[in-house]
Image: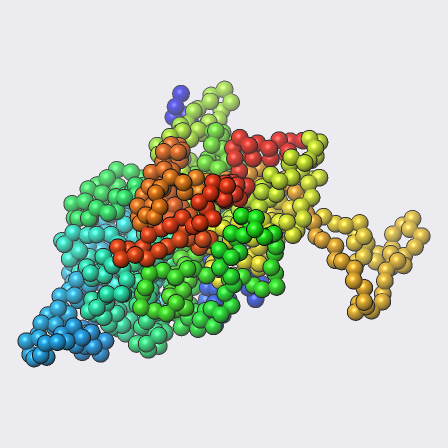
Amino acid sequence: MSGAAGGDRFVPFLASPGLSFPPQMKNWVCDSGQKLEVFIPFLGKYRPFSGRCCQTCTPKSWDGFYHKHLSSLGFRDVIRVTEEDTRYRGWLVRRVCGFLAIWGWEVPVDTPGDLPARICRSRRVQNVATGWSCGSRVDSKSHQQWKEKILQILAEIQAPLSLLVLRLCNWALLKLLNRLFLSVQLHRGQLAMVLRAARTPNVPLVFLSTHKSLLDGLLLSFVLFSQGLGVPRVTVGGQVCSPRLRTLLTRLGGIFLPSRMEQTLSDQDEGLPGAVLATYMEEVLRSRQPLLIFLEEPLLALHLSAPARQWLTMVYRAVRDGAVPDVLLVPVGIAYDVVPGGLQRQGCGAQPLGLGTCLRATCQALRRSHGCARVDFAQPFSLQEFAAKNLIEQSCRGKRLEELLLPTILGTCPSQLDTKKAELWSPSPTAATGLGVEEEILVTKLGLHSLSDGIACSAVMAVGITAALLLHKHQEGVFLSRLMRDFAWLLEEILLRHHDVGFSGQLRALVQHSLALLQAQLTLYHLAPIGDILVVPEASVVALWELGHHSAAILPIFASEVVGACAIHALLMEMLPFLGVTVRPSGIVLSQDELLRKILELLRLLPPNLLGLQPCQPLDCRSQDILDKLLLCGLLEAEELESERWVCDLAPRPFCSRRPWAGMDFTDSDSDSQDEVPKRCFKLSEPQDSPGLLLFLCRLLRPVLRTYARAVTFLDRPSWPQPEPAYVEALLQFLSEEDPFEHPDRSLALSSLQTFKEMGVLEEVRTPTGTLLHLAQPFHSSASRGKLQAFIQQFVPAVANGAGKIRSCRRQ
């Protein structure tokens, strides 16, 4: 029998500051660089306030616009507009309060009325226009021609705001959001922090947001407009729009790249369009209009898009050239129970969007319940401070990945830990953007850093927790009672890591709510004899891909523990053939040096943005932090040596004839003794309250490592050389054919390509027809490709091999 449990029904909820769960808490120490904060969460009273800026890159901004009491201000539902939000009262007002409230919202600033004249008078534009008209007489006719060209380019970029259209569209959007979502939550403390930053004189705000759906631009524009922050100028990425839709979006605050720059996405031949766009961005920042930039494209999670890099370059140029004294950057995180519009397949974004397409997508979205949504603002930080700090540290970059990891894989030199020099991850230079190499790396690092900040401040939704449990822990099926216990456990682990959740309510209602939203991918069996419900995920490509899509928000939260767990798995795969069948997990001892070596190798293999980690932390410090977190979560226990057990214990003990300090050496510590320091070791353990934690953490990273390993297999398929777009499409086709039960992820495929280029597996060669990819000489042989695949496979928990061996070892 398929269906829900007899009298039980799925109960929706409304998020509120409190959480109704039993208080089973422990201490969690959050290391924020130089300062330590101790956070003791209690699910009934407190919620974590995440989103602090990086103390390493922006130490002066660390204490700015942030106060301890902001975390207790609670939440508000931005789509719940009542008569209290208007200046009027009465029965009729309650019927039209939404329209009256929107009509009363003020637009603090707008683009100057003489904006076209300012752009035409700009020195940058005049210099380019003079060179453009070089060779002909500079008379009134040629002057009028390039002025018309400038105005034509400006019309492609933006249009003056239409307040009537703006208010009507926001009223219609309010109605749509109330139909789509149960609530759209906003933290009052985060809002107070951003409003305080907006009052900084002569310093504009730039919001850098994650991108989950095509609705994000309208949603964030509505949120900022409704909270008194003004109408933001929203950058539109690589999505092609029809002329009518483009005209409407520009009237609502959208700004586009000129058509010529949309095709090239580089400044090598930007000419007049690039000069007009750069001058326009300076004028927008001078007028202190809020600017919204999306850092990624939908379905390309944790991957900085090329349009975002170009928008950030223009913002950085404005600060570098002194157009504005500084810019305050605000990372933004968006979280949905279910992404509106459904799961769009890769490649659909190439089709132009029109008004008819948007209306059809809206009608389709209204047929499905989407649960709740949450918008989070991280702490604002100074762009000038970030740039000054990182430009100074550019000279501290370590060796290239090709020099660090490739010799270890091919066995040309022994892998050693180099702890004497801090390794800093640095992105490889991209296409020319008119900046120097160091500044180009700075802009890319700024985008990746802001993307990780936006992901870190994003709340975790109930659907994401349930999907992660069903996909990575109970893919064969689970009883509802067990699923509820695991839900409470995973929720507690998330809060202990200083991440917030976007829901509240009773445990059973929350789990049933998430199951209702995932019901198309599940089968529920009501087992009357035992009075429980069996939840079984569907064994289909769409079901597994959608569960993976929802559970992707869990990986950045456990990124450190996941890397450490995969390193433990790699060491176990090396040790298990030499261990006896009677060895218990507590009898397995791991060396600290070996653990750090495996952790460092995995950190070098995977880019930080793929794990949601900040790119500013040295790899050796990050590997030590991962080791500490493995001890804290209970996967490892320090192995105490016999010679060190009583060194610091001076208490008298019964039945002991001699004092503990009798055999101790109190001689000068600077003696010429050359005794080696004993190596630190750890015992493998399993937390009592988290059975199967090691395997669960390894499975969170399994899709990433599986894609990397299969990308190695693909290296002998194509004919080299070939263009990068053709390589990506052929790789996606190969991934879908090799494993039909795992839908290929374009974001992971692009990440594997990025890693292979930085490692030296693939080489880029510039030709007159474009950039071509070549397979590097060492990997022409199948033996070298086999070594690379074996290196990646050692971290992958195989369902039948590696995972089974670990489970059998634990049972002994």
**In the rendered image, is residue 413 in sight?**
yes
Single out the residue that lies furthest toward the left.
141
Res. 535 image quadrant = top left
In the rendering, at what x and y percent does residue 280 appear? 23, 70
Viewer-closest of 572 and 241: 572
49 horizontally vs 207: left or right: right
Colouring rule applied to residues = rainbow
In the rendering, at what x and y percent does residue 343 appear? 31, 41
Res. 650 image quadrant = bottom right
Circle count: 0
Residue shown at 34%/43% (left/top)? 719
Viewer-closest of 229 and 579: 579
In the rendering, at what x and y percent does residue 336 appear? 36, 47
Q: Indicate whether 773 appears above or below 390.
A: above
Residue shown at 19%/77% (left/top)? 126
Viewer-closest of 393 and 106: 393
Residue shown at 42%/62% (left/top)? 445
Viewer-closest of 605 and 96: 605
**In the rendered image, is residue 301 in sight?**
no
- Please state, as top left, top right, bottom left or bottom right, where the C terminus lies in the image: top right
Residue shown at 38%/50% (left/top)? 774
- Please state, as top left, top right, bottom left or bottom right, where the N terminus lies in the image: top left
682 horizontally vs 433: left or right: right
In the rendering, at what x and y percent does residue 662 appear? 90, 59
